[in-house]
Image (cartoon, rainbow, N blue to C red):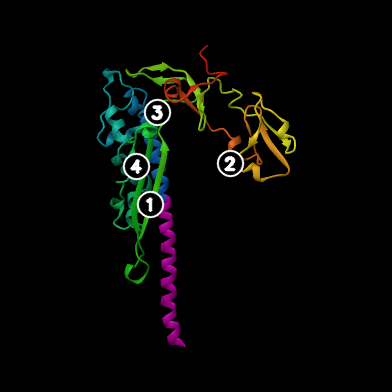
Amino acid sequence: MALEAAAAVPLFLFFVVNMIWIIEIIRLQDRIGSALHQAGNQAAYYAYYYRYGLKDGIPEEGGEEQGAGAVSESPGSGGAGITAAAVSFALSQTFVRNMVLELAGTEYLDKSPLRGGSGSISYLRSSILSGSGPESDIISLVADYRAGPLIPWLAYTDISLQNRYYGHAFVGFAPGSGDSAGENGSIEEEEIVYVTETGTVYHRNPECSYLKLSVEAVGRGQVSALRNNSGAKYYPCEICRAASDTSGMVYITDDGNRYHCSRQCSGLKRTIRAVPLSSAAQNYGPCSRCGLAH
């Protein structure tokens, strides 16, 4: 019996140690993910200045980047913040790597289950403002790394882990602000209009009735006799399969030509984006109610 106990105790301790190490791996992934998210947000902030070549307006609080090789504007040059070189640096993989190391902690990473220490995290699959068209303002950061057990030859094998950050960079358009940057870096007024994901027109008025749906619940037996504002009949929605539901209430709008069996149907939702008029005019026509120039 004593021999069995002597064999069981080391196995139990080995199990406990590895369970603690697994918890540390989870903690490692959470810490790197949090640092990567903050790095992505910071890059999104600097993207505006990079896109329009603006040197003024960036606060001095970004001193970390200056210490990595960026040069400050001289007092006589008229710049009020860090230079365009520092902005470019803030949109590089080197910036992301340095910021993750700073936020996660190099000392912690070197002592963590991370295989190869703090220098082993790869960002090769990351891309910053490298797309085209609608993807040109995307910041996609990918951190690949491996973590392993405390005693590799006696436990589980190394694990491949990944953290991602995916977001749109702030490129200077705030909904409703009407501000955009001109070619010379000055701020110019440009009208902001509103579009939907599935729409074909742009709206100058965010309160346009085409954007603000008025949903009404009616009995299914009534819908065949009803007409919308244009005098058109209502047909079953293909999304929520309204035709297959033959009882109860249905939902209609004043301007639509479909009835829905669910109030939560995506056909009754509007995802509205605010975009500059010059951009919207390339793909959308003006709304017949609010889109015509005043």
| Number of the label disc, if any, that sits on residue 239 | 2
Above or below, 175 against 154 in this view is above
Q: Disc 4 versus disc 1: distance between alpha carbons?
A: 17 Å
Q: Amino acid at mark 2?
A: Ile
Percent x, y for residue 48?
37, 28
Percent x, y for residue 185?
34, 19
- The image quadrant of residue 83 is top left
State whether the magenta stretch is mostly helix, strand or loop. Answer: helix
Which residue is most to the top?
294
Label 4 Cα crowd, 10 Å radius (few <14 / some 14-19 / many 20+): many
| Number of the label disc, if any, that sits on residue 162 | 1
Q: Is residue 17 visible?
A: yes
The answer to whether 204 appears left or right of 65 in the picture is right
Residue 88 belongs to the span the image colors magenta: no
Residue located 37% across and 35% down the image? 43
Percent x, y for residue 267?
59, 36
Q: Are marks 4 and 2 in contact (CB under 8 Å)?
A: no
Marks 4, 1: nearer the viewer: 1
Q: Disc 3 versus disc 4: distance between alpha carbons?
A: 21 Å
Percent x, y for residue 5?
45, 83
In terms of secondary structure, where does tag 2 sit?
A: loop
The answer to whether 252 appears left or right of 32 in the picture is right
Q: Which residues are magenta?
A: 1-30
Marks 2, 1: nearer the viewer: 2
Q: Disc 3 versus disc 1: distance between alpha carbons?
A: 27 Å
